[in-house]
Image: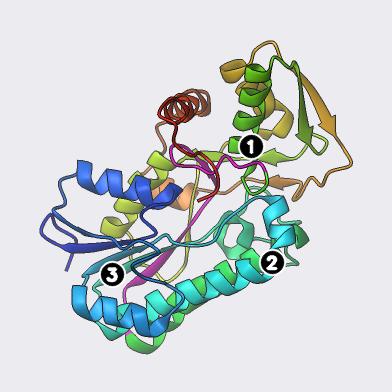
């Protein structure tokens, strides 16, 4: 059974960065029965509540993109929350999907599952081949557990549960709060605040040397739909652009879009994190999917979205 416009589809985490993009993509493609539940309506850490919801709503396909996320500071200061919340959310939704006969589930992980000193670009078989990056170890362990959970339900019960590992994401509905955001939205917020405050100096965490890969969340949503229709293997699959750049180069690109007159100052006393994170996306490319949104265009459109939220007086902080 494959997903059709008449299928009952549950997007777990629909209000977040990824979930909102998946929702937009499914609606644009004409899917008519998309199921969602807010955090107030359903605590995904509560197995009994999740079971009740699945029994009442009977989804046939599930996009499991819910989770607790954040940047280096958030991971360092809230490790218990990151590992508990994410392990519980993954476990309850996967188990309920099994109990109530979901036809197919796509679980979304993170590229931080790979070892800190992983050979670049990172291939799928590098999982568990070395020590993790200490600054986000709790989050990474939870994401690895999610992959293994899906594989275990495939092995024991024959369930069509698949996993995809995206690179660093950005786009509309991102978290721009400086205490908990990832690097790209944090940079947009810093340059914006400097421009609004008439300040030229913008401080960037770390040395600026680490290299990162960035994927627009709308491209990821398109990839998620593609994989739900076209991928059915036990192994997780990488989702990214296959291109990276240094944090210094990223900061200059954000400066160009937000505050061209700003001066960059790098605070080397702050942690850099993993030296480089670039995914090998050859398996995904071989299936026929590639990204379409360039980083420069994506930064500009994301900043336009940010400005629109500001104009409407809407919060663009932590969710």
Per the image, the residue denoted by label 1 is 186
Identify the residue at image location x=36%, y=45%.
21
Q: Could you classify mark 3 by the number of other residues whose Cα lies within 10 Å: few (under 14), some (14-19), or many (20 or more)? A: many
Point out the image quarter for the N terminus.
bottom left
Q: Residue 223: which disc?
A: none
Calculate the distance from the C-alpha at mark 1 to the C-alpha at mark 3: 35 Å
Q: Residue furthest top?
A: 261
Q: In this orientation, which residue lies closer to the viewer: 257 or 230?
A: 257
The residues colored magenta run 158-178
Instruction: Identify the image's colour scheme: rainbow, by chain, secondary structure or one colour.
Output: rainbow
Q: Report if residue 158 is visible in the image.
A: yes
Q: Could you classify mark 1 by the number of other residues whose Cα lies within 10 Å: few (under 14), some (14-19), or many (20 or more)? A: many
Identify the residue at image location x=55%, y=71%.
85
Identify the residue at image location x=75%, y=15%.
200
Mark 2 element type: helix
Q: Position of residue 72 (x, y in %)?
A: 71, 51
Q: Report if residue 101 is visible in the image.
A: no
Q: Earlier in the sequence, mark 1 or mark 2?
A: 2
Q: Position of residue 306 (x, y in %)?
A: 48, 30
Q: How many marks?
A: 3
Q: Indicate yes or no whether the magenta region holds residue 228.
A: no
Per the image, the residue denoted by label 2 is 79
Q: Earlier in the sequence, mark 3 or mark 2?
A: 2
Q: Position of residue 11 (x, y in %)?
A: 31, 60
Task: Say if 185 sits above or below 56 in the image.
Answer: above
Callout in the foreground (3, 2) = 2
Calculate the distance from the C-alpha at mark 3 to the C-alpha at mark 2: 31 Å
Q: Residue furthest front?
A: 313
Question: Do the residues under discs 1 and 2 have CB atoms within 8 angstroms?
Answer: no
Residue 307 left/right relative to 125: left
Task: Say if 38 sits above or below 21 in the image.
Answer: below
Per the image, the residue denoted by label 3 is 104
């Amino acid at each position: 059974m494959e997903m059709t416009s008449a299928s009952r589809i549950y997007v777990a985490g629909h209000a977040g960065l990824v979930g909102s993009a998946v929702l937009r993509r499914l609606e644009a493609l004409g899917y008519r029965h998309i199921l969602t539940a807010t955090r107030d309506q359903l605590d995904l850490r509560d197995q009994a509540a999740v079971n009740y919801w699945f029994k009442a709503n009977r989804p046939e396909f599930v996009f499991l993109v819910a989770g607790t996320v954040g940047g280096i500071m958030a991971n360092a200061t809230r490790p218990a929350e990151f590992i508990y919340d994410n392990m519980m959310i993954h476990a309850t939704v996967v188990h309920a999907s099994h109990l109530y006969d979901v036809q197919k589930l796509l679980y979304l992980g993170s590229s931080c599952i790979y070892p800190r000193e992983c050979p670049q670009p990172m291939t799928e078989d590098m999982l568990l081949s070395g020590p993790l990056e200490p600054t986000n170890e709790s989050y990474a362990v939870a994401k690895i557990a999610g992959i293994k959970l899906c594989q275990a339900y495939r092995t024991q019960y024959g369930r069509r549960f698949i996993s995809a590992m995206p690179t660093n994401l950005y786009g509309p509905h991102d978290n721009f709060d400086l205490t908990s955001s990832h690097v790209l939205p944090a940079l947009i917020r810093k340059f914006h605040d400097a421009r609004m405050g008439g300040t030229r100096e913008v401080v960037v965490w770390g040395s600026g040397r680490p290299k990162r890969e960035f994927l627009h969340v709308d491209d990821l949503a398109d990839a998620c739909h593609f994989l739900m229709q076209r991928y059915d293997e036990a192994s997780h699959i990488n989702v990214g652009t296959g291109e990276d750049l240094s944090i210094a180069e990223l900061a200059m690109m954000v400066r160009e879009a937000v505050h061209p007159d700003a001066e960059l100052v790098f605070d080397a006393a702050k942690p850099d994190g993993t030296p480089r994170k670039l995914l090998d996306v050859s398996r995904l490319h071989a299936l026929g999917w590639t990204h379409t949104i360039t980083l420069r265009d994506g930064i500009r459109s994301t900043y336009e979205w940010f400005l629109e939220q500001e104009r409407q007086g809407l919060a663009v902080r932590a969710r």
